[in-house]
Each structure stands twice: as C-alpha cells, then as structure tokens.
Amino acid sequence: MSRDRGSVVVLVAALLTLGALLAIGIGYLGRAADDRARAQTAADAAALAAADALALGRTSAGAAAAAGRIARANGGVLLTCVCGGGTAEVTVAVGPARAAARAEIALNGAKGAFFP
C-alpha cells in the first residue's frame, strides 16, 4: 500500500510540472501576440505621421523623423522609412515583433475614399 502512495506522489508532481510548463508556454504566446499587435499599432501611427509630414511639405528626412518620434511614443523602434511622392512606408519593431504599414496622401486634389 505504501508503494502505491509513492507512485501517486510522483504522478501528481509530474502533472503539476507539466501544467506549469504549459502555463509558461501560453504566457509566452500571449506576450508574442501582444508585441505583434503593439508593433502594428506603432507602424500604422508612424506611417500616418510620415504621410502627414509629407502633406505639410516636409522633406523625406522630416517625414522619417516624425515617424520615428511616433514609433517611439508607441513603444516601438522605427527600422525603415521610405517616404516620398505622397507615400510613406515604414517598418517598426516592438521587442522581437515587426510590422509594416503604408500611408498615402491625396495629391493635387485627387479624390479618395474620404474626399468626394
């Protein structure tokens, strides 16, 4: 009978260890998903900031600087910014996650979704 109790203790310990490892794995997956969402938010905001700077007549360097400020304000790091011709394309990293975004401005009174 005492040998059976010892086997149950080992089994319970193994199950608790497995449960703890699964919980840690789920935590890492949740963190990765959160980083990805934050990176996409930062990239979207940075692209819009760069496009806004271009619309205000700033240079590509000025647009990239605006994108960098907004990326940092959103917890990210601006990796790339290609700005010019009314288009801003950026890549932002938050932790190990990366995201890209693109924003355009309407030039010369061009009609778009928000401009009838």
Image (cartoon, rainbow, N blue to C red):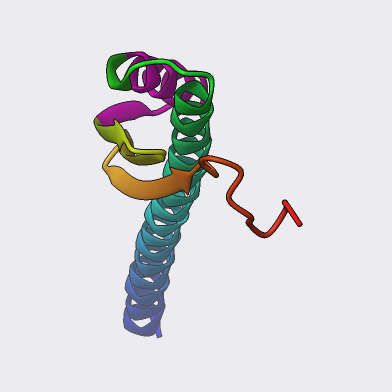
x then y, percent, for residue 37: 49, 50
x then y, percent, for residue 3: 31, 81
Asked if 11 appears above or below 96 in the picture, the reply is: below
Tell me the residue at 51%/41% (across/down).
Answer: 107
x then y, percent, for residue 12: 42, 72
The part of the image, by quadrant, that contains residue 95 is top left
Q: Nearer the viewer, residue 51 or 41?
A: 51
Total numbered badges shown on the rendered structure: 0
Magenta stretch mostly in which secondary structure? helix
Asked if 5 appears above or below 57 in the picture, the reply is: below
Q: Is residue 112 magenta?
A: no
Task: Find the residue positioned furthest to the right.
Answer: 116
Q: Which residues are magenta?
A: 62-79
x then y, percent, for residue 13: 37, 65
Position of 64 with respect to 107 (left or right) is left
Q: Is residue 77 magenta?
A: yes
